[in-house]
Image (tube, grey):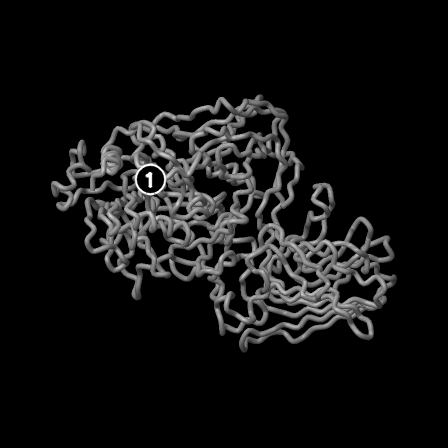
Amino acid sequence: MTASNMYPQDHLAEIIGYVEPWIVAPGDSVAIKISCTEQEYTYRTVRLIQGVDLDHSPKKAEEEVSEIPRGRRKGRFQAAQPGSYGHVPDWGSPETARGLQVSFYMQPWHVSCSHPQTFVSTLQAATHTGFAIVLNSQGTVDIWLGIKHNRIHVIETWLRPQKKTWAEFNLTLRGRSVNASLTPKAFRVEPIPSQAAFETLLDGEPSVYEPGPLFIAASQGDDSSGFAGRRAINFFNGRIDNLTLRTCDETPAVLAKYDFALEISSDTILDVSGHGHHGTLINGPTRAVKGHDWDGSECDWTKAKFGYGAIHFHDDDLDDAGWATDFTITVPPNARSGVYAVEVKATNCQEADWVTFFVRPTSWATDNSDKVCFVFCTFTYLAYANERLYDTTRENTADLGPGFDINKVLKSDEFYKMQRRLDLGLSCYDRHNDGSGVVFSSSKRPILNVRPGYVMWAFSRPRELSADLMMIGYLEREGIPYEIVTDHDLHSRGASTLRGFNTVITGSHPEYHTRESFGAYESYAKAGGNLMYMGGNGFYWVSALDVARPHRLEMRRGDRGVSPFALPGGEHIQSLDGQQGGLWRSRGMSCNTLFGVGFCAQGTGPGVPYKRTDASRNPQFSWMFTGVTGDLIGEHGFGGGASGDEIDRYDVRNGSPEDAVILATSTGHSDDFGIATEDLSFPALNTLGTQTNLIRSDVVYYVGAGGGAIFSVGSINWYCSLGWDDYDNDVARFTGNVIKGFLLGKR
């Protein structure tokens, strides 16, 4: 939530940035936030058409937006401050009380952390007042107390909580007397330590009853950031539940009592004491997780009467980098929909960045019958944002199959930036420092792998945005009229986003969808629209988005699916919308049911071509294959053949329509490709590419009940072959035939 401009002395020359908001409409203002190590930089705004610059690729193409003035700014370094916590502006300190009682349940997840971890704090170091309850780096609890307004006294209690074990902690401060106890709580019948207690007498009067803020899962830092005392340090990794503060009078009075089970979908924490000392959660800690009293009787927090009163905090959570705005631009009212970037370049070196954002159509006209609509996979971009699967020091290091070597990967400029900018938050593929899986991702930070020229380190090919832009370049090259929208638009506007377009084209990797965005495709198809699913691994994971906080995506990985981790049982219901997370297939809505194919395998090895089937020779499909002379389609591409990376197959057992036609199928994958885990049963045999026909891509076509056609290619690699040799290839001809045919009403 807060930013820092402290420049590390050994930092390399660098310029990066982000915009706010990430997705805008013509006429909107966009705040540009830049971190630059150099003295000065220039900027201009461009519409991106095609971003990669590789052998055999189309030429890099962009169009400057002349209505937005160029500029020059002084550089300044900016950094984010990760770490989630709760902030209460005023906790109702008992100025005349005889003492204070603090009680809560704790569940530490990282007991040997390199920094102190605060459970609860009112400590103000500048005035030597307040208290803090802290887990030290040795894994025992310390009490930090302000004494007589002139020093901070550290009390070592030697109380030692166990990792991932709930324990009730009680602290009583009465005059100079300090009493603390730790009572572990067994989940079932596992052996746990008995209650432990500590008491001591201070040598001075504590100054703990001063007005000021209450911090939960952190303690207050300095105010240099200008965020009204919110800047925090010493973040806790783990869960806190049922925090209560009382006086020690003869008749104890509750000062504040926090029920974290209330308003789980929000960033608000409620004081149920009646005193109104409500607070705010900073940097998106995880809610809808099991608390100290969860017993397994209900696994859905929206239905549970108890058991979900905990919040899981992390020292590497980041919801908002909080950078200062360097300048603002206004999107012209007549701007085309598309992907735009503010190109920033240091004036004294070669450092540059393309800070990307998306512009919706000028208006949601209903007469778009002569246009196609391209949907950018902004949910997928967020899910992968700044992923650290390359990091061998973390638990979630990628192991992508027999042919993959984590020590032999492509290290681009973006890779090195991600490697050194550890302040910019995690992806939904990463684990937190405490080992728990990440469920949130945010656009309010630089996303270094959402750049027009990005080449993915593990696959050594364009991926996500850089791959998707090759389709935009193709539409421009062919003069095909189009607009672009985003997953976010589908979520917020539903089916009306797509209404009237002749054809809707997906990105290369539309993996993540909310019920609303998935439903928009379904409604469009039911109304007779044509769908072209031009990627792989699509419509796979359920996601959630809060329209009030559209920068934040939630994704809860269940106990099935190809995934770097699975969340604990009882925590698969999304906090933002209360829906079941996990696979769409597990909810009975596999990708197959709408698009005819569904995810089946992945691999980092080279892709392979498709081979036309006998069914494709039917004269009714001849219009699709004009200029496609051979049996094989997609022999070349930036990732090998057109079937590669993550791939989808036709399978009636998984919901593919029986009347769909397979026009082409991949020619056989190597053992660098492994089958999706949800397709396995016991015993797990024949799991690699040469061992089973279940590992394949299928090009599938059918006409739906609404009268529109569905065309699916089942491979992330498709766009990498589309752009090969400057679009002079059979994948481009095949793709163009289908798009142009749909625009002419062919089926």
Asked which quadrant contains residue 375, the reply is top left
- 508 or 502, which is in the foreground? 502
Residue most extreme to the front: 366
Residue 461 visible to the viewer: no
Compared to 399, does 261 lie above or below?
below
Residue 132 visible to the viewer: yes
Give the percent coordinates (x, y) of residue 691: 24, 54
**Count of labels in the image:** 1
Circle 1 residue? 501
Asked which quadrant contains residue 162, the reply is bottom right
Q: Quadrant of the C terminus?
A: top left
- 18 or 317, which is in the foreground? 18
Asked which quadrant contains residue 135, the reply is bottom right
Residue at figure coordinates x 73%, y 47% from the top left: 229
Give the percent coordinates (x, y) of residue 250: 82, 75
Quick check: 212 left or right of 232? Answer: right
Give the percent coordinates (x, y) of residue 704: 24, 50
Type of residue at label 1? Phe
Residue most extreme to the bottom: 189
User: Element under label 1?
Assistant: loop
